[in-house]
Amino acid sequence: MYPFGFYWDSTMIILLPAIILSAYASFKVNSVTSRYFKVRSARGMTGEQVARRILDSNGLSSVAIYPVRGTLSDHYDPRSRKINLSEDVYYGTSITSISVAAHECGHAIQHKESYVPLVIRSAIVPAVNFASSASWIIILMGFFVNKNLLWIGIVLFSATVLFQLVTLPVEFNASRRALVQLDSLGIVGQEEKYQSKKVLKAAALTYVAAALSAILQLLRLVVIARNND
């Protein structure tokens, strides 16, 4: 969504915690999901079957489920009301497969219940898409054309920070819903529930890293702007 450092100076030290956390989060999610991709769930249900079971049990039989290419490219599309599962998840019977599938169902349930953070995130997506692209152009212009543009770019970049912060409760809540559904529908046993929780916690760490990166990048931009005043 934005470069870590288009402008290299001493303020780069501000980003160090985010860089470290992002690297750790990437390592963690890759290692944990890879590990539990190799562990078959006791019931042998595929990710698609788990998703279908959860959706139907929550009055969401109209939500379609499709396989898509890519690794962990899973997502729920509220506009078309469909869940897209990566092929490893859609066809897989592993702990990772059913955990990720359940997580995406969590988003569908949020949508049905008009979960406030999800409503807010969906509403600001168009503005954030524009602001995240335009902010860096305007910030660069602030260095070479007019210093006041630098602050305008920073204000626009703040939309990215807001999006990342709103995303945190959306993702955490979807994971909590996923675990409840897996347990209440008898899809997993106690040990498998613990394993699913590890998968979802690892995935959630990537969103924490993204939020921290956005916050620290905003702080760095403010410091740069003040130094240039």
Image (cartoon, helix red, strand yellow):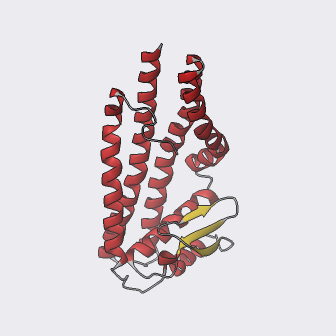
Front-lying residue, 60 or 3:
3
Residue nearest the viewer, comparing 158 with 229: 229
Point out residue 23 in the picture as x, y percentages from the top left corner: 33, 52
Residue 27 drawn at (x, y percent): 31, 59
169 vs 108: above or below: above
Q: Position of residue 208 (x, y in %)?
A: 40, 47
Q: Work out whether residue 163 or residue 6 is closer to the camera in this orientation and state it.
A: 6
Left or right of 147 on screen, residue 5: left
Residue at image coords 41%, 41%:
213
Furthest residue in direction top, as rendered: 229
- Compare residues 24 and 89 and report the one nearer the observer: 24
Residue drawn at 35 percent across, 59 percent down: 202
Residue 228, how many percent across, how many down? 46, 16
**Residue 76 found in image quarter:** bottom right
Q: Is residue 116 above or below residue 47?
A: above
Q: Residue at x 47, y 69 (%)?
A: 71
**Image quarter of residue 57:** bottom right
Does residue 222 appear left or right of residue 37 in this picture?
Answer: right
Number of marks in picture: 0
118 vs 173, left or right, is: right
The residue at 51%/70% (across/down) is 70
